[in-house]
Amino acid sequence: MSRRRPRPAWQVADFFALEREAEVYLGAVDACLAVPAVARRLGVRPQATAENARAAMLFESNVERAVAPCRATQERFRALLERSERQRRRLDYLRDRTHPLTVVLCAVTVLALVVAVLSAWPTALAAAAAPPLTAVVIWRHQVWRMHVLLNLREWTLRPRAALLERRTAWAAAAWSRDLQENGVRPLTELVVEALLGEDHDSLLLADNFHGLRSPRNPRYVVESLAARSLRRKIAQLESGGTIAVSGSRGAGKSTLLETCAGEAGFAVVVQAPATYSPYDFLLSLYVRTCESYLVHRGHVPPAFLRLSPFRRAARRLLPAVRKGLALLAFGLAAGSLVVLGLAASVRSLTTRQWPSVRAWAEDLRRRAVDVVVDIWEGERIGAAVLVVVVGVLLWSLRRWKQWRAVRTYARIALVVTGLGLIVAVFLSLLADDDLRTLAGRAVGKVGVRDLILLAVLLVGLVNLLSDQSWEMRGRVLLTLRRRRPVGWALFVTGLVLLFTMPLTRALVADPDNPLRLTVALLGLVLIKTATWSPTSPIPTLVTTCRDELFRLQTVQTASSAVTAGPPQLLTAQTTSLSTVPPNFPELVADFRTLLGEIAAEQHRQEQRVVIAIDEVDRLGSDTAALAFLGEIKAILGVPHVHYLISVAEDVGASFVRRGLPHRGVTDSSLDDIVHVLPCTLEESEEILERRASGLSEPYKALTHALSGGVPRDLIRYGLRLDEIEAKTRFVELDDIAGQLILEELSDTLAGFRTLLGKQRWTARTGTILVAFRNVMDHLRPACPCGSTELRWALEHVAFHDLGGHLGEEAAAEVSDEARELLDEASAYALFSLTLLDIFGRGDFARRRDEAAAIGPAGALDLLGRARQELEVSPYSARHLMGSIRSAWQLPEGPTAGPRVTVPMPRDADCPRHPRVSV
């Protein structure tokens, strides 16, 4: 009976041919287990460990699933690995100690080659005979022959084996990458999730919370429905208008305004003051607009705290001095080199031509002087009349509208003259007989060196002037992207080589070249003169904004002194002039004028001007906000200016019901309104995924429910999750949800107890405050597991029955305001108790699916709507929470029946959740 050979420890169902394959696979598994997103999930539950995950990845089914997508790279690696193993075994067979005769044979061969290369033919032939003779001697001895052949074969095979080993290592790395990307990594995540259990989403294992710690960072902003609506409304109001952004506190109005302002060509964002006067607000907006426009145009707003003459002069002179020094340094160096090169030529030209030019100029001057003297003395009447006519014509030409055309024609003439001089220089080269003769001789001697030189020059020039690649038939002939250092290096190298050629040296050494170079430089100067334009002056609007800042932020005083009388009786009179701050109507008119000019400039550039006024809801009431809109109405309606104003919901409601039955200030102040509604569950999940990637669905639903979809509170509760995890090391949903809900409920009930303490109470009704104190004593340890006494205490508040707790006679003594506060506190306690029952118990996934199957009331999004309803009315909120508790199969009343008093809290710490000192 044949025995089956035991399978090696590294083999898994014949998936690996060699042990090294198994090592690569295990290395890919370890790399995938070390990924932060996977490593965070290991160790949070007893069965979810790295050892168990590694063992599960070695199951036959898992290995087959992981290796299947990577068959091609595995087969390539296996083929190279088998070849490498055969080479290794052959090397092991050939491995022998190095024999001395092998070294002798190699040394003789190398020496013979050196002698053959460096010596004459007879000596080379004699040296060539030495290696064969040595080989013959070794071949005749069997032992020597065996050792030498083994050494030579091993030395010949070793480089090939090293190269094959390197190719095998590359193939192993390729297979490992393929495994990690396509095979092992997805399977590892599934294996870890299986080890974590069915309810693995209830673990708090977010990748990071960086986005929650930077709430105003624009990279984490998620585009909402309100943002798209606002963009559409702005696009519809092409000529400008006023749009109100309405929503509750924390709904994201400020972020929406800042995003729209960032997309505009010119924008100003200001905050409305809590206590304001229209004049001060408009003055502040005026100054902010001027400063923002100066910054927008690249200028620095004036600093009025440093008005010393020395600082102002230094601020103006230092930039000019820096620019002048740079120009002077390069100008002196360049001018010195040009003068040095052209000095002899210009001096020779001046020596030959200066006498005739000087005589002609002197004759012309003498004739002009004679004519002027004759006209002055009255001897040339006709010339005098002509001069008068010319003077009158010259005066009449001061307003001639064609001067611009004349300047254009003059510039064209200068450019044509300059180009003509440059072309004449090149034509003079062609007309030179000596140069033509030399060029004709050189053309017949063009060789490979000249062609290479021409290619280097062309490549350098093309690389300097072009940013594209050259390709032909899919094969890249030359790929030189726009890298100016490479282009300059090639071009300069080509020029240096060019000047080593005889033809180039002969062309450069021609005696007439300095004169030609002078004429070419003169042509370039003419072209530069024609195309030169003075530095663009400071724009008018920049000057206007700077002047307005001086007028609005400074008091300007001018004084003059007059001295009269003889020296012994001196009298002085001083006059002081101080600017008067503009009044409100003048300030409005000036601001509208300046803003209109800025908007007209931006409109010509197809840009938009946005003035965003934020925090109007800080004014306290809708009456104050409407009064504010009525006061600033005078600055609205500037053409091509979009005003965006954030207002509270009640002001938005005033605009919606415009004309029913009376017209309000919003009718004439606002053109449209955008309502920023609380986020839906899907929008909240998108925000949290952007800001805290890896956060699982139950935690997104929990933070959405607590915040009611308000982005600011959503971010705050997301940070509280991170804080609780860092403080308590809890990772399970029931622990973290219980901790978060109870802490929030404790803070809320403490606020309600403070408000209730301001009401009037009697000896019989004061037990309500005692009940609230006892409930807060239960909540103070904030143990997430919750005891029976804690639940009874919460139910006492959530299902509060004033008549049943105090009696009908004592309940009648409670004021209406106190009853309203009790109803609100009871509704919020019921909401918290509902969240505890949903999120604070295990097996969340199963219960969620069962509630969703019952009907719409079991949807998680409804919890956020219940939180929103608490801000409207506690009674409608209780009705909605009743539907939710019914869908989740939660008790609709106290579990232990009505209790008159709140049980005392437990004294001992919870053994599962000991108190953690913060």
Image (tube, helix red, strand yellow):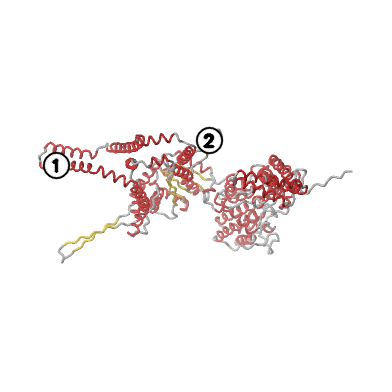
Q: Residue 265: x, y in percent?
A: 43, 44
Question: In the image as oriented, which residue stretches furthest toward the top?
Answer: 473
Which quadrant of the rendered structure holds the C terminus? bottom right
Label 2 Cα neighbours within 10 Å, binned few <14 / some 14-19 / many ≥20: few
Residue 860 position within the rendered picture, expressed as x and y whole percent measured from the top left: 63, 46
Q: Position of residue 205 (x, y in %)?
A: 64, 52
- Front in this rendered view, residue 233 or 189: 189
Furthest-bottom residue in this view: 568
Q: Are marks 1 and 2 in contact (CB under 8 Å)?
A: no
For disc 2, the marked residue is 471
The residues bearing labels 1 and 2 have C-alpha atoms spaced at a distance of 74 Å
- Residue type of the residue flagged with mark 2: Glu
The picture places residue 432, in percent across and down from the top left corner, at 35, 36
Which amino acid does the dot numbered 1 rest on? Answer: Asp
**Going by the image, does 705 lie left or right of 571?**
right
Element carrying mark 2: strand
Is 213 left, or right, of 137 in this rendering? left
Taking the image as shown, residue 821 lies to the left or right of residue 404, namely right
To which residue does mark 1 refer?
Answer: 370
Q: Quadrant of residue 313?
A: bottom left
